[in-house]
Every structure is written in structure tokens, then in C-alpha cells.
Image (tube, rainbow, N blue to C red):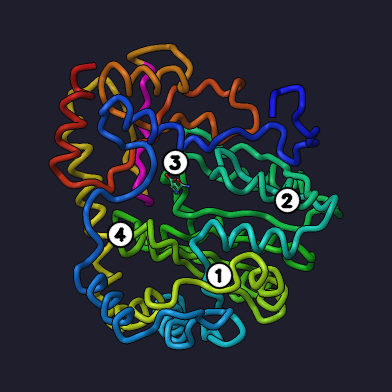
């Protein structure tokens, strides 16, 4: 068809282009730059886990899994949740295996947000929340996190609540800033939503990547929050296999039931042999309890390599992302600086302004760097960054 013959479409997402992760990874590949932009490890998933997947494939576990997920995996997840957060969760009715965190988030929003409902997001926020809200006719209400620590302005959150508020989206450890919620934050939230019908969607995909002796504040630890929450998790982040796209959603039975009505028609079910392998692998808690120390060492190594550079930073409290400020280097917009850094210096990172509703009004000069990389990769990247 020529352009004049296109069938007219009224876009449901007129403002949305291609995600920044696709754009920056493509640019990094094109320029042969070191890719610290899109968040994924450049080292292997544990060989034992890969062997388990192969074993289950050979054993013939290759047809559809049950819609809600393989029971053995849901049982292991329930045991992990009880061990870590002290909450007894029912595997049959409160845990759903999803095709990654993004699908869990989309499914929760599409199942629970109605036309005209308001959903509070704290920005900068991960880029899949707002399009999902818009696709189901919801209204995103953007609240900026407070600099310099990207902390939650609870007074402002309180002011922005209305009779139409259906949901608040939380994310800790936070992508893109690496900030983490504290027990005081959770108590504030509990206080705000008490006696309301507000739901909490809690993106906790970096639950095990938290540093300096802090513990992850899951909504699952707070009974008054749990009763109104959907918590989302990701095996890709925990076991270094983001390409397997397996995660899960945990929510009380009445919310899980609604979510599954949508889930069954979005993916129906998730990769069978991977689920069996994960169920086996989760039996050893050391496989995830070692993660904070592993990534804390990577964060420290990356930051030590950057000593003497003109970038400034405060160490990430969690996630595998480190923000670096470039005020001392340039006053360019972060989107321009990120492109130039990739093309001229050979290191790709993510501009933080794209995670805001109005990126052009964001003045902070800061980029997000992923340190889930082999030490050699971090060394090569730091060598280039030190020259700037
Ligand atoms: N979560 C990853 C990040 O923040 C990206 C995932 C994706 O590319 N959609 O970098």
C-alpha cells in the first residue's frame, strides 16, 4: 500500500514510540559500544539451572503448563515467601506464573483498572506502567519522587488521592534510580490507604538486589497492605536469565481470580520445562540468598573503577542500576548526551528523563548504567568513562 492508501487508525497510544531499551540497545550494537543501557546480565545463568531445563525438556515436559502455573513451582514460591516475608500464601489461589514481570503488571492493570479510574505513579517510573493504564482507559496521575534521594513525597501522594483513585503503583528496589522503600515508607502508605478501596500494584522484581545490609520491604510483609496488593516478581532478575521471561504475581484470592480471567487470554500459560526447572532450583535458598552480596560487590567494583571520573554519584541502594550525574561534564539534555556517549565514547546508558511524563521539563543531568556485567565489561566501560 502507498501512504495515501493506509487504513486510518485512531491510535490508542498516540504518544508512545519504541521503548528506550530497544532504542539504546540497537544504537549500542550499531556503534559497537559497551551496552550498559538495557538491564540484563552479560554473564550466564547458572549451568545447573540450564541443565535442569534441558532435563525436563528431554523428559517430555513440553506441552502446555496449567494456566496458573506448574503446581510444584507455585509451592516453592509459597515456601520462599513464607521464609522471607513471613506470609503464608496459598499456591492454588494466590500465586500466578507469568511471562515475566511486564506481563504480570499489564495483566493486573488490565484486569483491575476501569475506564476513568485514576492510578498513581511515582516518576521517574518504569516505562510499561503508563501505557498499560492508558490502554484500559485509566488516568495516570504522575507524582515526582523527591530529589536528591528519589524519596516518596507522602504528603503530596495524600493530596493527590481522590474518590477515583483505584490503584497506587510502587516499585522497590526502584528502576531507574536504585532507591529503596523503607519501613517508614510502608507505614505511611499503610496509613494513607487504610479504610479506602485503593489497590497497590507493587513491582518488586529486584527484591533480592538490595545493599548495605538493608532488607527488602515487600508489601507481603505488611498484612494491611497485602490484603489489597498485587506483588510482582521476576526470575530473570534473580537467576540471570531475562530472556526466559518467567515471573509471577502474588495477590489475595479475590484479586488473583480477576487477574487470571485476563491472564488466561493474554498468554494462557508459561513455558513448561522452565517452570519445572525453577521449582527444583528454588529448593536451595542459597541460590537466591547469595544475590545481594553478589551484586553489592559489582556495584562497589563499578564505583571504585569510576573514582577520579567527572561523573558524580551516590551509591545505588538496590537494583542493578547506578545513576551517574554529568553536571560537571555537559549541560546537554540527557537524551542527547546518552546518544553522544554511545557514539563518541562507546558506552551506552539510559537517559532518566524518558521515565517522566514530561521529559522535556526534566532538568536533571543523569544517566542510568546497568552494572549486571562481568568485571571485564565494567573495566572496559570505566576506562572509557574516565576519559570524559
Ligand atoms: N527491565 C529492563 C531495564 O530496565 C528492560 C526490559 C526491557 O527491555 N523491556 O533495562
Between the C-alphas of marks 3 and 4, the distance is 20 Å
Query: Mark 4–mark 1 contact, CB under 8 Å?
Result: no
Dot 4: few (<14), some (14–19), or many (≥20) neighbours within 10 Å?
some
Residue receiving disc 1 = 249
Which residues are drawn in magenta? 318-327
Q: Residue 299 at x, y = what percent?
A: 25, 45
Between the C-alphas of marks 3 and 2, the distance is 21 Å
Q: Which mark is residue 22?
A: none
Q: Residue 230 at x, y = what percent?
A: 61, 67
Task: Give me the residue at 78% from left, 45% from top.
Answer: 139
Residue receiving disc 2 = 119
Query: Mark 3–mark 2 contact, CB under 8 Å?
Result: no
Q: Which tag is nearer the camera, tag 1 or tag 2?
A: 1
Along the horizontal axis of the image, is 369 left or right of 309?
right
Q: Specify whether tag 1 is near ligand 1 (CB below 8 Å).
A: no
Q: Residue 263 at x, y = what percent?
A: 64, 69
Between the C-alphas of marks 1 and 2, the distance is 19 Å
Task: Give me the residue at 16% from left, 32% from top.
Answer: 380
Residue receiving disc 3 = 177
Q: Specify whether tag 3 is near ligand 1 (CB below 8 Å).
A: no
Please identify the residue farthest to the front as the structure is shown: 1
Between the C-alphas of marks 3 and 1, the distance is 23 Å
The quadrant of the picture occupied by the C terminus is top left
Callout 2: SS: strand
Residue receiving disc 4 = 240
Between the C-alphas of marks 4 and 1, the distance is 19 Å
Q: In this view, does 264 lie above or below 123?
A: below
Q: Which tag is nearer the camera, tag 3 or tag 4?
A: 4
Task: Give me the residue at 53% from left, 29% from top.
Answer: 353
Mark positioned earlier in the residue sequence (1 or 2): 2
Amino acid at each position: 500500500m502507498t501512504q495515501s492508501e493506509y487504513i486510518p487508525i485512531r491510535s490508542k497510544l498516540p504518544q508512545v514510540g519504541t521503548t528506550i531499551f530497544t532504542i539504546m540497545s540497537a544504537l549500542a550494537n550499531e556503534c559497537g559500544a559497551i551496552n550498559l543501557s538495557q538491564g540484563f546480565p552479560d554473564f550466564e545463568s547458572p549451568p545447573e539451572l540450564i541443565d535442569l531445563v534441558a532435563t525436563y525438556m528431554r523428559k517430555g515436559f513440553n506441552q502446555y503448563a496449567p494456566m496458573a502455573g506448574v503446581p510444584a513451582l507455585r509451592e516453592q514460591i509459597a515456601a520462599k515467601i513464607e521464609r522471607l516475608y513471613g506470609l503464608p500464601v496459598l499456591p492454588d489461589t494466590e500465586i500466578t506464573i507469568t511471562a515475566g514481570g511486564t506481563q504480570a503488571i499489564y495483566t493486573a492493570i488490565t484486569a483491575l483498572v476501569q475506564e476513568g479510574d485514576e492510578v498513581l505513579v511515582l516518576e521517574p517510573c518504569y516505562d510499561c506502567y503508563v501505557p498499560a493504564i492508558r490502554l484500559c482507559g485509566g488516568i495516570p496521575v504522575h507524582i515526582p519522587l523527591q530529589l536528591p534521594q528519589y524519596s516518596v513525597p507522602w504528603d503530596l501522594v495524600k493530596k493527590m488521592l481522590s474518590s477515583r483513585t483505584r490503584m497506587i503503583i510502587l516499585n522497590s528496589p526502584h528502576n531507574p534510580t536504585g532507591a529503596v522503600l523503607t519501613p517508614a515508607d510502608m507505614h505511611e502508605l499503610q496509613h494513607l490507604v487504610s479504610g479506602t478501596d485503593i489497590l497497590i500494584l507493587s513491582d518488586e522484581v529486584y527484591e533480592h538486589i538490595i545493599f548495605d545490609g538493608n532488607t527488602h520491604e515487600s508489601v507481603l510483609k505488611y498484612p494491611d497492605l497485602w490484603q489489597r496488593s498485587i506483588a510482582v516478581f521476576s526470575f530473570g532478575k534473580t537467576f540471570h536469565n531475562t530472556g526466559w521471561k518467567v515471573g509471577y504475581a502474588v495477590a489475595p484470592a479475590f484479586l488473583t481470580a480477576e487477574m487470571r480471567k485476563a491472564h488466561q487470554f493474554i498468554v494462557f500459560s508459561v513455558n513448561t520445562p522452565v517452570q519445572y526447572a525453577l521449582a527444583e532450583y528454588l529448593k536451595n535458598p542459597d541460590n537466591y540468598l547469595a544475590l545481594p552480596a553478589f551484586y553489592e560487590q559489582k556495584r562497589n567494583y563499578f564505583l571504585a573503577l569510576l573514582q577520579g571520573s567527572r561523573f558524580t554519584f551516590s551509591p545505588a541502594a538496590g537494583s542493578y542500576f547506578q545513576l551517574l550525574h554529568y553536571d560537571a561534564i555537559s549541560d546537554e539534555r540527557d537524551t542527547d548526551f546518552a546518544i553522544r556517549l554511545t557514539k563518541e565514547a562507546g558506552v551506552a546508558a539510559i537517559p532518566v528523563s524518558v521515565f517522566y511524563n514530561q521529559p522535556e521539563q526534566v532538568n536533571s543531568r543523569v544517566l542510568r548504567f546497568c552494572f549486571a556485567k562481568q568485571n571485564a565489561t565494567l573495566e572496559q566501560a570505566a576506562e572509557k568513562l574516565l576519559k570524559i
